[in-house]
Image (cartoon, rainbow, N blue to C red):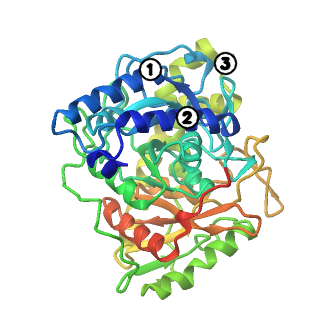
Amino acid sequence: MKGALGARELSSRDLVEAHLQRIEEINPLVNAVVTVDAQRALDSAKAVDDLRSRGRDLPPLSGIPMTHKDIHETAGMRTTFGSPIFADNVPSRDALIIARLKTAGVISTGKTNVPEFAAGAHTVNPLFGTTRNPYDLNRSASGSSGGVAAAIASGIQAAGDGSDTGGSLRLPASFNNIVGLRPSNGWIPHVPPGNPWEWLSQPGFMARNVADVALLMDLCSGPDRRGPMSRHVTSRFSTPDADPDLSGQVIGFVPDLGGRIEIEDEVAAVVSATGPILLGMGARLSDEEPDLGDAAEVFRIARAYEFAANYGRLVENHYEQMKSSLRNNIRAGLNLEVEDLFALDAARARLWTAMQDYFSRHDVLVTTTSQVEPFRAEVEYPEMLNGKPVTDYVGWIHATSLISATGCPAISVPAGFSATGLPVGIQIIGPVGGDALVLQVAGAFEAATGHALSHPPL
């Protein structure tokens, strides 16, 4: 699209109209897009076309339409956070990731569905209902970035913004056969009026291919004077055409994290088959797993703290308007004691040391992204995993949540399809700050396999 616009083979109005038409055709099936501002988008497209016709230099994505995750504030456009509490909320400001997309030239057209306050890995809420998987409309699109993932997989748009606490960019990518990167903290920094010290939840991008994710990282990453955790080092995320050669790379290939997680047989079969592919690309595989003994506790406490910090003020006045799992997480954060915070810091320090040690011997780590196939859309989370009950709504996402606790960048890239025809992704993890390396390895795997070229029957 970017090239066609620059060559004037397409106008921005052409693209926006096609985008809006695709929403009209497909969205009744998948329920990915929950707010559309067609007239403002068309007016913006006309303004871009006028500037282009006068030979003006324009930002690289000028005229490209995009809906945004409904927890990212968009100035003048409804942002509900998937909650009845904010059903009519129209912010006056853009979240940083939205502001940077607009600076790059993106035309905002609407918002995509999320679970309430992005809590949970299944996209359903009382305002807009359930987002469905375009590969099987009876299945979940995962979450919390499930709306944007389904929109991308359905051909509504090429890429989009999301966020990831316990897997919310990676799990929907796996369920929808697209790419999702959880970046290292600070590339897209947290800024006030939110908590600028927040680290567990990360904004990031999803797309049909690795190159588009890398391009968006190039355009939207960088320090902000309001963000104390900003990364001030420069990095080029985009690379020339991916070369499916991983010669010299040492890859920790541990799909189940050394037996730490359960994986459904259908998923395990696909992920295991990627080992020989990586070997064939020249990589050297290691079965050594990292020491993630502190990861579950780090995730549990940090997640409770961030939910309480962000949404604790709402519990007193809006208790009945929140789902029980969300209330429980907020209450857990409000009940933390100082000893818990001391323990969190100590555990994070041990986990940091363990991952530094691991990546002194390995370039990247490869695991499964999701432990399960896309599950039935009518349930909040899978009830059973390999015959064992799943006790809560994060009990099936340890493959991603344990990695979130490390702070390491992680990407999900399509790895193939189960025997039932459902997408499966692998997760590629690198050292903190090593996002460009993660993208490089993911791009090489994508080039070698071509799984990202498959699209749903819609």
Q: Which residue is mark 3?
A: 321
Whichever of labels 3 and 1 marks the residue nearer the N terminus, that label is 1
Mark 1: few/some/many CA within 10 Å (<14, 14-19, 20+): few
Q: Residue 253 in the image: state x and y as whole percent.
A: 52, 77
Q: Amino acid at mark 3?
A: Gln
In this picture, residue 147 sits left or right of residue 242: right
Q: Amino acid at mark 2?
A: Gln
Q: CA distance from mark 3 to mark 2?
A: 34 Å
Q: Which residue is mark 1?
A: 39
| Residue 426 visible at all | no
Q: Secondary structure at mark 2?
A: helix
Residue at image location 64% in from the left, 47% down from the top: 142
Q: Is residue 423 above or below residue 182?
A: below
Q: Residue 250 in the image: state x and y as whole percent.
A: 40, 82
Quadrant of the image occupied by residue 239: bottom left
- Are dots 1 and 2 in contact, CB under 8 Å? no
